[in-house]
Image (spheres, rainbow, N blue to C red):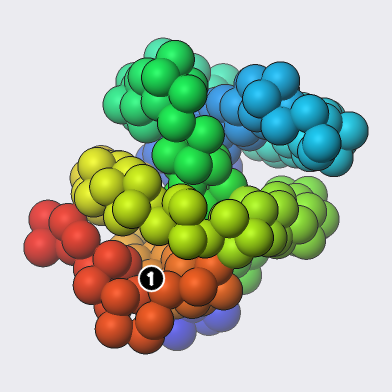
Amino acid sequence: MPQLEASPVINFQSEKYKDSYSRINAIVIEGELEANGNYKQLAERLPDHKDELLKLAKMENRHMKGFQACGRNLEVTPDMEFAREFFAQLHQNFQDAWAEGRIVTCLLIQSLIIETFAISAYNIYIPVADDFARKITEGVVKDEYMHLNFGEEWLKANFEASKAELEDANRQNLPLVWKMLNQVAKDAEVLGMEKEALVEDFMITYGEALANIGFSNREVMRLSAQGLSAV
């Protein structure tokens, strides 16, 4: 069934929907909260971009409040414990890289992987969302492309010096995305979001970001497919 036809038959008030929504809503809230903290940290190490990064951090905080309102609108309590566990490994990898001064890895995790993951999920969710959440999510997606663009531009400007670390960071972190997608596939399906569509949208957006930074088409195919066999 095409996704656009799914929305009219979704019962946003059913217990099954609300149960799945409690986890998906928590993930987007936690994702925006993590991003807020990550951009604040990056602002400390990238003083030339401090104002821009702090502006992005504020934007992420606003998104978090928007998604909290989406949960309240459906009278759903987000399962934040689940969401913290969901992001735990990516969070740890970011903090480990931060402690070791690997800013390129931090940017790949936040500005490429997390932003692309968010954009893909939001794009697939919008056609099947309730009216309130659709309006919130459409506004968020426009902002997320700006965040992705920041990481792309910085890494593009520092591509040659960053390339080896980018490849290593991709190898470490991209497989986590496929694991995360598998973890929420059933809940996403209840919300009308097909796993195949999520994977496809992520692959396209992430591949475009890698190409924009400076990787060749062949390198993009190799990098964006790492860990994909787990899906």
Q: Is residue 187 above or below residue 157?
A: above
Indicate whether 159 appears above or below 4.
above
Residue under the point 60% across and 27% down = 38
- Residue at the farthest left position: 229
Q: Which residue is disc 1 drawn over?
A: 203
Does 74 sit above or below residue 187? above
Considering the numbered disc 1 on the image, is that residue within a helix, a strand or a loop? helix
Left or right relative to 100: residue 89: left
**Up-down: is 118 above or below 103?**
below
What is the x, y in percent for residue 135? 80, 56
The residue at 53%/80% (across/down) is 5
189 or 103: which is nearer to us?
A: 103
* Type of amino acid under label 1: Met
The quarter of the rendered structure image containing the N terminus is: bottom left
Q: Nearer the viewer, residue 74 or 214?
A: 214
Image side of residue 111 versus residue 179, left or right = right
